[in-house]
Image (tube, rainbow, N blue to C red):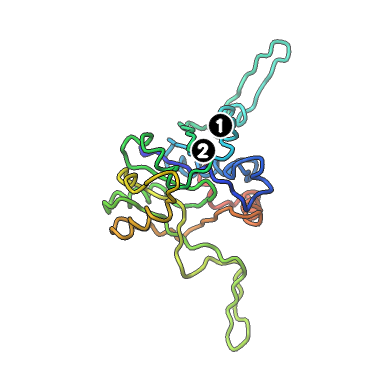
Amino acid sequence: MPKAILLAGGLGTRLAEETSVKPKPMIEIGGKPILWHIMNIYASHGFKEFIVALGYRGEVIKAYFENFYRLNHNLSIDLATGKTTVHEGEHKVDWAVDLVDTGELTQTGGRLGRLRDWVNNETFFMTYGDGVSDINIKKAYKFHKSHGKLATIAAVRPSARFGELGIEDGQVKEFKEKPQTEQGWINGGFFVLEPKIFDLITDDDCIWEREPLEQLVKDGQLMSYQHNGFWQCMDTLREKRMLEDLWSSGKAPWKLWD
C-alpha cells in the first residue's frame, strides 16, 4: 500500500495565537489535532502508513505520537504501585507513523525531497497538514494509476467567503449562505505522486508549488482529480471556528470513520 507524506513543518503565521506554542497541524478540532483528522481520512480508505515531515516545533508532534496510545485510551492507575493499565478504546488505530525531521526553515518542495528514501521508490500520497475533505482517497489513487502520468492533484472548488446573492433588475431573487463557488478550481492539497517527481526538487529552498508543479504542467505530467464535495483548509481563526462548529454538530463531512 502506498504511504502518505504529511507536510507538518510550516510556521502557520496567520494562526499565531495558537502556533506560537505548537505547529499548525497540532491545532485541535473537537479536541483532536487536525493532523489526526487528516490521517483518519486516509485510514478510512485503507491507507494507514504515514510519513510526517516535521519542522517548526516538531518535538510537539513527536511527543503527541509517543504518548498517542495513552492519550487516546482510558487509563487505570494504581497509585500504590505505579502500575498503569491502558484500556482498549472504541476507535482502534493501527497506523504506522514515521516522524522525520526535515528542517525548520525548509520549503515544501525541500521537505518532500528529504523524504525520497522513505517512500521505497513507490507511488505515494502527499498532503498538507492543514485541510480536511470528504475526498475519496481510494478513487483518487485508482484515477492516478489509470492515466500513467507522474502526478495527480486534487482540484477543488472552495466555499465562497460570503453569502452569494442572485440579483435580477436590482431585486434579490436568491440568497445562498457561503455556497461552493461555481467557477475556478484550486489546489486541494491532496496529491498522488510517482517517485520520479523527486528529480524535479533541487534543494531545501525549493517550493513544491512553483518550479516542480510548473515543470510537471509543462511536461504534460500533471493530471487533476476533480473533487466536487467538501473541502476546507484552516488558515485563519474564522476557518478553525467553522470546522469546530461542523465537528460539534455531529455532521462534519470529512468524518468518514466510525
Asked whether the residues under the numbered discs 2 and 1 touch, taking CB atoms below 8 Å apart as contact, a structural biologist would say: yes
Amino acid type at circle 2 is: Leu
Return the residue found at the far bottom.
169
Disc 2 secondary structure class: strand
Which residue is more in the foreground, 36 or 58?
A: 58
The picture places residue 59, in percent across and down from the top left corner, at: 58, 33
Residue 242 found in image quarter:
bottom right
Which residue is more in the foreground, 52 or 67?
A: 52
Which residue is more in the foreground, 257 or 49?
A: 49
Foreground: disc 2 or disc 1: 2
Q: Could you tell whether 159 is left or right of 50 in the image?
A: right
- Look at mark 2 in the image and give the residue it sits on: 54
Which residue is more in the foreground, 83 or 237?
A: 237
Q: How far is disc 2 from disc 1 in space, using C-alphas?
A: 9 Å
The picture places residue 202, in percent across and down from the top left corner, at: 37, 46
Residue drawn at the location 48% of the way across and 47% of the way down: 107
The picture places residue 74, in percent across and down from the top left corner, at: 64, 27
Q: Could you tell whether 53 is left or right of 140 in the image?
A: right
Dot 1 alpha-carbon crowd within 10 angstroms: few under 14, some 14 to 19, many 20 or more: some
Amino acid type at circle 1 is: Lys
Residue 228 found in image quarter:
bottom left
- Look at mark 1 in the image and give the residue it sits on: 62
Residue drawn at the location 62% of the way across and 87% of the way down: 170
Residue drawn at the location 59% of the way across and 37% of the way down: 57
